[in-house]
Amino acid sequence: MLTKPFDYQAVGHLEQACDLLRHHGEAAKVIAGGQSLLPLVNLGLAQPSVVVDISRASGHRGVEVADGSVRLGALLTHARLAADPFLAQAQPLVGAAAARIGNARVRVRGTLGGSLAHSDPAAELPLVMVALGATYELVDPSSTREVKAEEFHAGFLSTVLEPDELVASAVVPALGPGWGWGFQEVSRREGDFALIAIAAVVRLAGGRIAEARIAAGGVADRPLRLAEIEVAVAGLEPAELEDRLRSLLPLPRLAPPSDTNATGTHRAHLAGVLVRRAVGEAAARAEEARA
């Protein structure tokens, strides 16, 4: 399907884009890499009268590590997230998830901010941000505000972004001492959206799990923290994880949807398998870091 004619506006700063969004309202759409907007246009789900191009806007492309946190600019591409050496050292879970997105063409063009704002419940980056307890920095024409990832993703392709706001950056905790990470995903084909994906980070202290953060994608209309699982594994030795996690099946509070790709029952089964793998992987990495 072809879009109707539209006015094209390229901006040099995100605040300029926000001004245009405020002025044009719902008639305007933002494009950076085009990996979210163009499919919607092709399906006839979006027909903008104004397209605001932020791909050449200044700034918001850095990876900044300071004071135990990592700030990721919204215009970072998935390929850059997957390959950046500073990010690989400071918070490798983000890069590992980004490497699983689509194919090389998608990763070279798609951006962090675009993925977060699109808020697909099966997408890798929103899932990882929820698992890590990320904070998003949102800008409008005159101000900045911060929103937690769990509060930002409000439903299927839905966020708390105001009509004149954009995601400017995401701030995640650096991988501190004693922490390990795990990421597991199943899709029908390499590069497809995940049927189920699980992200986990685990901290070991004294040989036992002192803290865990676990989230699931593809199980609801947004990424979900698995708080019950986090509580259940606290205090365990890594060798005890498998039996404890098996005892929790079926996973509490999960009722995945059925669609043409998989039934809800199949997704629930996959979630149980991938939670065991991701948490076990995170615990193993935490043990390696202590060795």
Image (tube, rainbow, N blue to C red):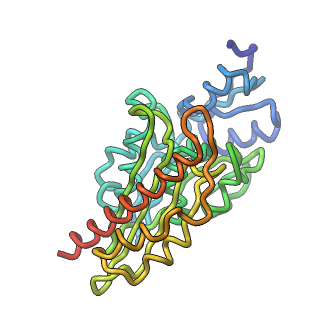
Q: Quadrant of the C terminus?
A: bottom left
Q: Residue furthest left?
A: 291
Residue 48 vs 54, above or below: the answer is above
Q: Nearer the viewer, residue 53 or 100?
A: 100
> Quarter of the image holding residue 67?
bottom left
**The N terminus - image quarter:** top right
In the rendered image, residue 136, in percent from the top left (x then y), is placed at 59, 58
Instruction: Tell me which corner region of the image, top left, top right, bottom left or bottom right, holds residue 285.
Output: bottom left
Q: Is residue 176 visible?
A: no
Out of 48 and 1, give the one closest to the viewer. 1
- Tell me residue 155's x, y (percent): 70, 50
Residue at left 66%, top 57%?
A: 152
Tell how many labels. Answer: 0
- Image coordinates for residue 66, horizontal then vertical, percent: 40, 67
| Residue 108 shown left or right of residue 30 in the figure | left
Residue drawn 73% across the image and 53% down it? 160
Residue 151 visible from this viewpoint: yes
Left or right placement of residue 161 versus residue 111 in this view: right
User: Does 131 sit left or right of 136 as displayed?
Assistant: left
Across and down, in percent, residue 201 comes to: 40, 66
Q: Nearer the viewer, residue 81 or 139?
A: 81
Q: Residue at x 55, y 30 (%)?
A: 35
